[in-house]
Amino acid sequence: MAGRIDIKIGFACNNLCRFCVQGDKRHRVKTPSTRKVREELEKGRDRADGVVFTGGEPTLRRDLAELVSFARDAGYETIQIQSNGRTFASRRYCAEIIEAGATEFSPALHGHVPELHDYLTRAPGSFAQTTKGIRNLKSLGQYVLTNSVVVRANSRNLPQLARLLVSLGVDQFQLAFVHPVGTAGENLTQIVPRMEIMAPYMMRGLDVGLKAECTVSTEAVPYCILPGYESCVVESRIPDTKVVDGGVTVEDYRAYRVTEGKLKGPDCPDCTHFELCEGPWREYPEKYGFDEFRPVRGA
């Protein structure tokens, strides 16, 4: 069994990101009770040996350590905390969650300097807290895999961001192209960069990580946009995943992505990567079209 369950344990957040995929859920979706989360964890063990606590910002829940401990005792082998990383600026808090049983931490860093990151999160001081959180986790021997959402404002600075992540000692970093829904969808043209313009900067960022022997990946970027970086495309490595999202459950996240979330163009069947590639999030070509996505032919 190598499946995973992603549980969104609340949508409250101490950031207010300009690209937040969750939009206004923090105001309209009720936080699940401890009992409800435990029930989902119990059900999830039928198919998964890994769990991701996410949100919103999961560290705002006072019972997170309790939930992590419950997941450990239920037999989950991998327990990941997906977070904006700010609460981990407290070394004591880090130690508490590690003691409870967390095995991986996925903080989010979106800018290479405070001015950019804090602008994107709309939370002054968040860069300092997140970078301190990463340092705390690494000093405590934890596996840290960061996620950075690629938007118009940071797309040209991806190489500098990659150098920062390497200097922080992260084990893995992911460059995830923004999903144009929620807050990002409301301001699509201001938030979402053109992929062809972004691609060279993403490649240079990936090169920084590869040279440092850091595990690197991309998310929501079709193969044809990043020729030569096919091994970095994360979709082929995402395990069978169930997502519990604010009262809505997606039993098969990959099936959702390929049938509803993403979209392929009329020329895509001619591409060598057609079977593996999922295409971009559908909102992107619905706005910008498919001209950027040219089939890759041959081996």
Image (tube, grey):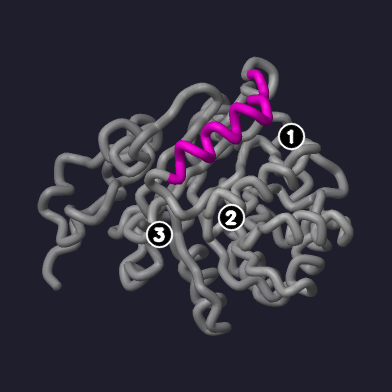
Whether residue 45 sits left or right of residue 105 in the image: it is left
- Element carrying mark 1: loop
Q: Count residues near mark 2 (Cα–Cα under 10 Å), then give few for <14, some for 14-19, many for 20+.
A: many
The image quadrant of residue 101 is bottom right
Q: Point out the residue furthest to the top here.
A: 28
**Amino acid residing under circle 1:** Cys
Please, what is the three-letter code of the amino acid marked with disc 3? Val
Spatial CA span between label 1 and label 2: 20 Å
Give the spatial CA distance, label 2 vs label 3. 19 Å
* Magenta range: 30-45
Between the residue at mark 3 and the residue at mark 1, the CA separation in whole angstroms equals 26 Å
- Label 3 vs 1, first from the N-terminus: 1
Residue annotated with mark 1: 13
> Measured from the top left, where is residue 104 in percent x and y?
62, 61
Q: In x, y percent, where is residue 55?
A: 62, 37
Residue 116 appears in view: no
Q: Quadrant of residue 146?
A: bottom right
Q: Residue at x 87, y 49 (%)?
A: 125
Find out whether residue 31 is within the magenta segment: yes
